Amino acid sequence: MFARECNNTISFLVLVKNNSCGGKIMPNKIKLVVSDIDGTLLTSTNILTPYLKKTVKLLSTKRIPFILASARAPQGIFPLAKELGVHSNPLISYNGAFILNMKNMTSIQCLRSYPMNNEVVVKLIDTVKKKFPAIAINIYSENNWFVEREDKWIATESSITKLLPVKTDFSNLYSGSETETHKLLLIGEKEDVQTLFTYLEKVAVAGISFYQSKENYLEIVAAKVSKKMAVKKLAEYYHLMPQEILTIGDQFNDVPMLKFAGTGVAMGNASTEVKQAAKFITATNDEDGVAKALKYYVL
C-alpha cells in the first residue's frame, strides 16, 4: 500500500496527561476521543442533538480532542465538525484513507494519504462497467466526488451527504498519474451489490480491501486502510497509549478501532457482532448515546 505523509505538523489541542491507572476507567484518563458519524453522532433523523453539542464542548475545556472518523468525504464531515466546534481538529475520512485538517469547505491540509493503485482502480472500474452495468460508480479523491452518470443512487447519496458530485469521464481522471483515489463507492440493488461482493472475494484483487457499509453500498479502499490505522497514527504522533483513547461507533467498519482503543464503546443501535467486539455499550444514537458515554467515561 502506498502511503503519503503529507505534512509533519498536526494541529491539535494540547494533550494533557495524567497517571491515573487501575481497572476502572477514571475521569481524565481518556486523552483522545474518536467517534464515527452516521448511526453514532447523528440521530436517525440525521441531526446533532443540543445535549451532544453541549457535552462535546466540555471536552474542549478539558483540552481533550474530539475527532470525527467516517467513510464520508471531507466535505461531508467538516460541516458537522464545525457544528460541534471541533473543526480545528484533524478529520479521518474515507474510513482512514485520508487524514486531514480543514480550514473551510475548500481549503484542506493533508496529513496522511493512503490511495489505491491507479492501475488497480482502472481495472476495477472497467470490470464493474462490464459485469455490473446497473451499479453506480463513485470515485472519491481528496475532497472531490466524481461520477460518470447521474441516476437514482447518485441522487440519494447526494441528498444524504448534501454534496454535489462532479460529472466527468473517468478515463480523463487517470490519463496522467496525479489523481489519488481514496475510495470507490459502488451503489445498486442489494442483490447486485452482494453478487459483486462475492465476485471480488473470489477474484482476490491485490492491494484493496472492501466492505458493505449498507446492504446496497460496497466501499473499496487501499489494503489495510481502516479507522484503526488512522487512530493508531494519531496516537503514535502524540505518544498516547491505547488505554488513553476512547473510540465509539456502530458499524462493522468501526470494529477495528473499537478493539484497538482501551475504551471501545458500541452504540446501543449497533448489531450484536459490533457490540460483542466492543468493551462497553452505550445508549442508541436516538438516546444521546455518545454524550452519555462521554459523561460516564471521560468527563
Image (tube, rainbow, N blue to C red):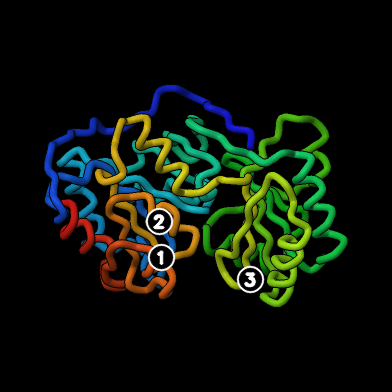
Which residue is rendered at x = 37% and y = 33% of the image?
236
The amino acid marked with disc number 1 is: Asp
The local secondary structure at tag 1 comes to loop
| Residue 128 visible somewhere in the drawing | yes
Q: Residue at x 38, y 60 (%)?
A: 249
Label 3: few (<14), some (14–19) or many (≥20) C-alpha neighbours in 10 Å: some
Count of number-bearing discs:
3
Crowd rating for badge 2 (residues with CA inside 10 Å; few <14, some 14–19, many 20+): many
The alpha-carbon separation of the residues under discs 2 and 1 comes to 8 Å
Cα separation, mark 3 vs mark 2, equals 20 Å
Could you say which quadrant of the image residue 44 lies in?
bottom left
Viewer-proximal residue among 222 and 150: 222
Q: Marks 3 and 1, Cα distance to the nearest angstrom?
A: 18 Å
Please name whichever residue, 149 or 19, is drawn nearer the observer in this view of the structure. Answer: 19
Quarter of the image for residue 210 reads bottom right
Which numbered dot is residue 36? Answer: 2
- Numbered label attached to residue 250: 1
N-terminal of the pair, mark 2 or mark 1, is 2
Question: Which x, y percent locates residue 65?
Answer: 28, 41
Q: Residue furthest top?
A: 8
**Amino acid type shown at disc 3:** Asn
Residue type of the residue flagged with mark 2: Asp
Q: Answer left or right for 126 relative to 207.
A: right
Say which residue label 3 marks.
Answer: 216
The reply to whether callout 3 and callout 1 are in contact (CB within 8 Å) is no
Q: Is residue 112 left or right of residue 18?
A: right
Where residue 91 appears, as percent x and y from the top left, is 43, 42
Q: Is residue 275 above or below residue 110?
A: below
Whether 38 is drawn above or below 206: the answer is below
Q: Residues within 10 Å of mark 1 (few under 14, many from 20)?
A: many
